Image (cartoon, rainbow, N blue to C red):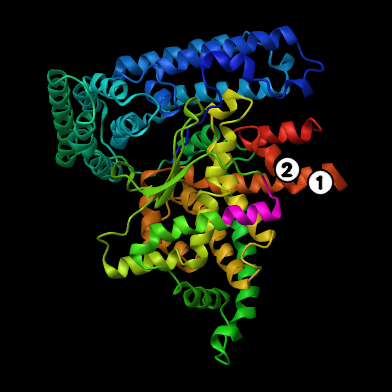
Amino acid sequence: MKKFLLCATAAAALAACNNGNSSNQTNGTDSTLNHAFSAYQARFIDALWKENPDWATGVGYHKYDSVLVVPDSTAAAARLAFAQQQLDSLKSYDLTALNDANKIDYQLIQNYLESVQWGIKEQKSNEWDPSSYNVSNTFAFILNENYAPLETRLRSFGSRLQNIPAYYEAAKKQIKDPVPELTSLAIDQNNGGLSVFEKDFADSLKKTGIPAAEQATMLASAKTAAKAIRDYAAWLKALKPEHPRSFRLGKALYDQKFKFDIQSSFTAAQIYDSAIARKAFVHGEMTKISRQLWPKYFGNTPMPSDSLELIGRMIDTLSVKHVKPEEFQSAIEKQLPSLIAFIKKKDLLYIDPSKPLVVRKEPAYMAGVAGASISAPGPYDKGGNTYYNVGSLEGWPKDKAESYLREYNQYILQILDIHEAIPGHYTQLVYANQSPSLIKSLMSNGAMIEGWAVYTEQMMLENGYGNNEPEMWLMWYKWNLRTVCNTILDYSVHVKDMSKEDAIHLLTKEAFQQAAEAEGKWKRVSVSSVQLTSYFTGYKEIIDLREAYKQQQGKDYSLKAFNEKFLSYGSAPVKYIRQLMITSGK
């Protein structure tokens, strides 16, 4: 899921906090221009929040909590005008005369604005993706986060409710020949969010001193809003488009989306080729480990001559060790303290003990895309909870639950915690909130975020996590293969028209995933595009950067120094972080 991040407590603080790196990067730059650019960024941020109130709320800037933008043609025209106006403003600053930190911020702003234009003019997902219309997330955020007194938050909630009927009427007018898979997702997620309006809001009102008459008015608005959401889901269910769009993005749109979303130094095709090569390497390593382990688990039983069959047998044997369905969430919670202790013992990086991490059942309005994710507060609300959302197995058929738990066996569950929590996403997000650059955190790069989480898995095992047991290494390679095959799958499906049958074969026979996991991944690739490439792309670029940094530092190299320095730049694309860590010689 996309994570939006910031680093300051007020937009006006941008000029003061933006150039945390500038003392090392002022040589040969125009200090007057840099100050002017910082002032421009403050104006840009202020205008950005006005244009994107939901985004503002999500990152803890609450001036526009009561505003819900109706997604009609007028709003689209306003977004285009905003993007063009800001691009015109950018042109007044000489990129070559800015310091390194500001050069990167300039490019991040430019990329964002150009992606807005491309999305509206060319991608046009507002016409074929009904799931892009869903109000539940921000409303739930306002209810659940304690950034202001409950009565204040509920009145903002009540004001936003007024536009929900118009919001969904506008959505209906935008939609043309939608993607069937995205239509189903929209129905599930919008229905899943109804409890926010029908139950949670009413329960919260009971805890306040808001006058009864005012409460009655607000509850009536909530009832009307819930009806609009339910009607939208019913309208989608009844919709029979004459020429429904395929969920496959196609090469032209895919290449552009990859460029804007991933911001890699590589093209989508180059990353696909690298993933193919990585898959072959990982298969080789897994074969070596499986041959080593075979006698331990199979004694004198003849070893399969086919390497993929050998690896598959070994993984199947190890995967039977897993928790019970009802213990899935509690097992995740129990694992976290041992990860913190290991990091402290090995001195891999600083973990801030003051930032809360709350493991919770995945909310219904988020269901349908991933089984585990992190939801973090923006730096405007640094005291807010970070949630580790865990998908529930409640109500699953026994065979489906067993397949899922074999996928997340006792080895993989530990790696999942490393990836999602410590020192993966949760830790990176805590650091990002302290970034000296607001823009680098605001224009958060998914490849850097996901790449860091994948990188930390390898880093932990390299430093002895799991006691260097070959079983743990085999399972990590399996997990890493999942990252690699995410890229192969996404590119193959959206650009090369890979069939579901071939996709399931790739995932189960070459990536050794359980059937339930493979089916879930097929669903995910049918309702998303490009995002699945972020894991391998970011991982590859971070590993490459670490090697370059190590060579540059020589005998002064420190893994902890690399980790903390890398995280200090916020969630910027790795190619730009590399410029600050390598090109500058710092």
Which quadrant of the figure has residue 195? top left
Expressed as whole percent of the image width and height from the top left, the position of residue 49 reads: 44, 18
**What residue do we see at 72% from left, 32% from top?**
579
Q: Badge 2: few (under 14), some or many (20 or more) residues near its Cα, within 10 Å?
A: some
From this viewpoint, is residue 487 visible?
no
Magenta stretch, overall SS: helix
Q: Residue furthest front?
A: 209
Q: Position of residue 157 (x, y in %)?
A: 27, 24
Helix, strand or loop at label 1? It is loop
Q: Measuring 23% from the left and 41% from the top, which residue is drawn there?
A: 187
Dot 2 and dot 1 residues touching (CB under 8 Å): yes
Rate crowding at label 1 as few (under 14), some (14 to 19) or many (20 or more) other CA atoms within 10 Å.
some
Of the two numbered discs 2 and 1 on the same chain, state the one appearing first in sequence.
1
The CA span between labels 2 and 1 is 8 Å
How far across and how far down the image is residue 362, in percent?
35, 48
74 or 353, which is in the foreground? 353
Q: Amino acid at mark 2?
A: Phe
Residue wearing tag 2:
562
* Residue segment shown in magenta: 339-349
Which is nearer the eye, 321 or 102? Answer: 321
SS at circle 2: helix
The quadrant of the picture occupied by the N terminus is top left
Instruction: Let me know if residue 371 is in the magenta part.
Output: no
Name the disc covering residue 557, or none.
1
Q: Establish if 536 lies above or below 99.
A: below
Residue that appears at 73% across and 17% down: 96
Kindly tell me whether residue 566 is visible in this rendering.
Answer: yes
Q: Please, which residue is most extreme toward the bottom here? A: 300
Q: Name the residue type under label 1.
A: Tyr
Q: Nearer the viewer, residue 256 or 260?
A: 260
